[in-house]
Amino acid sequence: MPENYRERIGVLIRDARRHQGLTQSELGKRLGTSQSAVARIEQGQQNLSLEMLARIGGALERELVTFGTARPQHLRIVGGRKLSGRIAVKTSKNAAVALLCATLLNRGRTTLRNLARIEEVNRIIEVLTSIGVRVRWLPDSNDLEIVPPAVLDLEGMDAEAARRTRTVLMFLGPLLHDRDRFRLPYAGGCDLGTRTVEPHLAALRAFGLDVVATHGFYEAVSTPHQPDRPIILTERGDTVTENVLLAAARNPGTTVIRNASPNYMVQDLCFFLQELGVGIEGIGTTTLRVTGVADIDVDVEYSPSEDPIEAMSLLAAAVVTESVITIERVPIEFMEIELATLEGMGMRCEVSPEYPSVNGRTRLVDLTTHPGPLHAPIDKIHPMPFPGLNIDNLPFFALIAAMATGQTLIHDWVYDNRAIYLTELTKVGASVQLMDPHRVLVEGPTKWRAAEVMCPPALRPGVVVLLAMLAAPGVSVLRNVYVINRGYEDLADRLNALGATIEVFGDS
């Protein structure tokens, strides 16, 4: 064991105790020991037997220590089979992480209903728990309850968990009102090339936040004040818009945000902030007027809307396997350009009448797919900010283009590296030519073949390779699929329910 193992175990015990809302004295009573003994344990000053660790874990309802190292997960896919049946779209991953960050604004209890249980959500929960927030899944549900402490323990932040997600950047907006100085670890997430944080920092300076990057951290100094003019975002980014919304939510004046993203996760955040009492005009447009509330202390419940990216994933699965399936609860407002593009390629879908999501705002439909010959589009396929074709849906069009007769140019102008990962489709039989770091030329139709492939380190390209393997006759293996688990809940099991054969396994 490393020399500081006692200190590390002590921190785990401290964080688990705080998560349960226990004092050191209360934990001591559960263990039949004293408050001072618990304090020594948490300070790393006490040797612990395996029996004692098990007792502490039982008292805290948490497994503190496991033996061996966590094994990478892999998928074994038997491809070449048709899918059939009905599948419902789960709630949005990107909305979920924004809402979790937004709970830092509220001193009351927040309950988020039907949240996706995915690794990205788990990382944010780990970070929130490490700073003293009580977070728990309600029994037999995907409902998450969040209760903040009187004072956040930012010094106790789990830096390792924070560095595994870019979402930690969205702590800047909520925290600038509560601390004159604080630090956040550098943000991580998918490997998609250089993604500057400067648009975030430039926008937040209007609220009095200055950030300097030093020694692996963002060092923040905050002197909150009312922006003296509208905030003009230099890019219409989703997370930068959300960060400014989070900063404006507790600013008691009115903040005007121009060139704001009106995308699905931003709308969900706006709806939630309205539940907290924040005034927001212009939802769904590129100009937002936010009238904040200096102190927010309410018990609130909210249900995020369904995920258009998951809906596109399921649609691509139907196309690549030439299957008839019904995809329920599709947020149609955020899929209309995608469906129009597919229609231009020869795709046929039945669309049900619209009905509302649980939040009462998002418009949903059910889609039934019909297989048929596809042809390449006349023009290139490229993303645009909403209401254009969604940036995260673009990789699925490379997969669909591989089913179409002719050549399709896919132009991913947003990310530096993601188009490169689409060339992994060549390993399962597709013809994908890299034109430059942002463009690939796909020629179809494809005769898919089984293969063993290392999962690309980016979420959507990873799922694209998985879906291609569903179409490839024989047995394929997709190795190290952690990145897929970041954004999809039980994807293998849900596809299996439609008739796929996907086995999850680890290294022996």
Image (cartoon, rainbow, N blue to C red):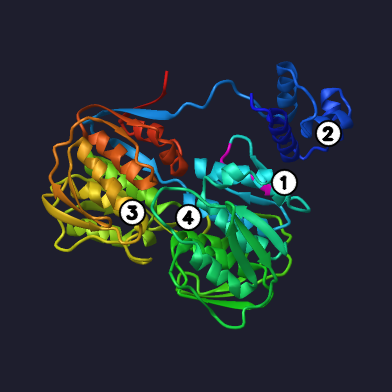
Q: Which residue is mark 2?
A: 39
Res. 393 mark: 3
Instruction: Mark 3 vs mark 2: give the one in front.
Output: 2
Q: Which is nearer the eye, 117 or 258?
A: 258
Q: Which is nearer the eye, 289 or 82?
A: 289
Instruction: Mark 1 vs mark 3: give the one in front.
Output: 1
Res. 357 mark: 4
The mark nearer the N terminus, 1 or 4, is 1
The mark nearer the N terminus, 2 or 1, is 2
Q: Residue at x 42, y 22 (%)?
A: 507
Label 1 packing within 10 angstroms: few (<14), some (14-19), many (20+): many
Q: Is residue 240 left or right of residue 321?
A: right
Q: Residue at x 30, y 55 (%)?
A: 394
Given the image, on which type of amino acid does mark 1 rest?
A: Gly
The mark nearer the N terminus, 4 or 2, is 2
Res. 132 mark: 1
Q: Is residue 484 left or right of residue 40?
A: left
Given the image, on which type of amino acid does mark 3 rest?
A: Asn
Total numbered badges shown on the rendered structure: 4
- What are the residue bounds of the magenta stretch? 141-146
Q: Quadrant of the C terminus?
A: top left
